[in-house]
Amino acid sequence: MASSSPGTVEDEETIARMVMSIHFGKNGIKPSLFSYVFDKGCSIQRDSIATDYELATALSVMLDGGRLAWLGAVTAITSDVRSIELPDRRTRALCVYDTAEVGNPAHGEICCATSELREGDRQAISRRLMEVFTATPVTANTYRLGRVAQLL
């Protein structure tokens, strides 16, 4: 853990995945919202501990110089993510852990717990993530009562 780390991501923490314009299509959130889970890790924010300012700072980097737009966030309880299992194997599919960064101590990652995935596992895990995280994103203007959006 980084020196700026607040510690282990606890099971009862609320975590947030920021929804950017590339994650949203005509039918709503795309399954690609969680695609990085299977290779380099899917960034999340530890919503329970992040300050509005820290979130706005992290989002300003994600906006990629205006190339992307921030649409909102989806949230979940960490234990619900950790409870997702590999289909037909009763084995944990995902890990959630702290990856604090300088200026963003509330940064974390969701990663696949194994490299031995069978055909259909990625789709099943992605579908479960979409169920565990709120199905409809909280819009940028209502997330945290609009405070983060105002800081951008």
Image (spheres, rainbow, N blue to C red):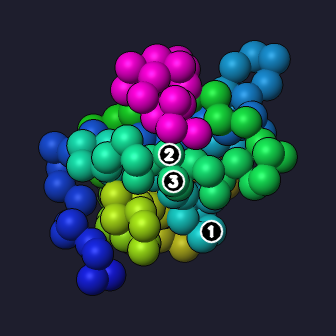
Pointers 3 and 2 in contact (C-beta within 8 Å): yes
Three-letter amino acid code at disc 2? Answer: Ala
SS state under label 3: helix
Residue 14 place in picture, x, y as percent: 27, 40
Q: Dot 2 corresponds to which residue?
A: 56
Is residue 135 covered in magenta? yes
In the picture, the quarter occupied by the N terminus is bottom left
- Badge 1: few (under 14), some or many (20 or more) residues near its Cα, within 10 Å? few
Three-letter amino acid code at disc 1? Answer: Asp
Bounds of the magenta segment? 131-152
Residue 122 place in picture, x, y as percent: 61, 51
Question: Mark 1 or mark 2: which is in front?
Answer: 2
Q: Dot 3 corresponds to which residue?
A: 57
Say the numbered circle drawn on residue 39.
1
Residue 133 place in picture, x, y as percent: 43, 32
Query: How many numbered tags mark residues here?
Result: 3
Three-letter amino acid code at disc 3? Answer: Thr
Considering depth in this image, is 85 or 148 the residue closer to the camera? 148
Question: Mark 3 or mark 1: which is in front?
Answer: 3
- Quick check: 144 left or right of 64? left
- Badge 3: few (under 14), some or many (20 or more) residues near its Cα, within 10 Å? some
Upstream in sequence: badge 3 or badge 1: 1
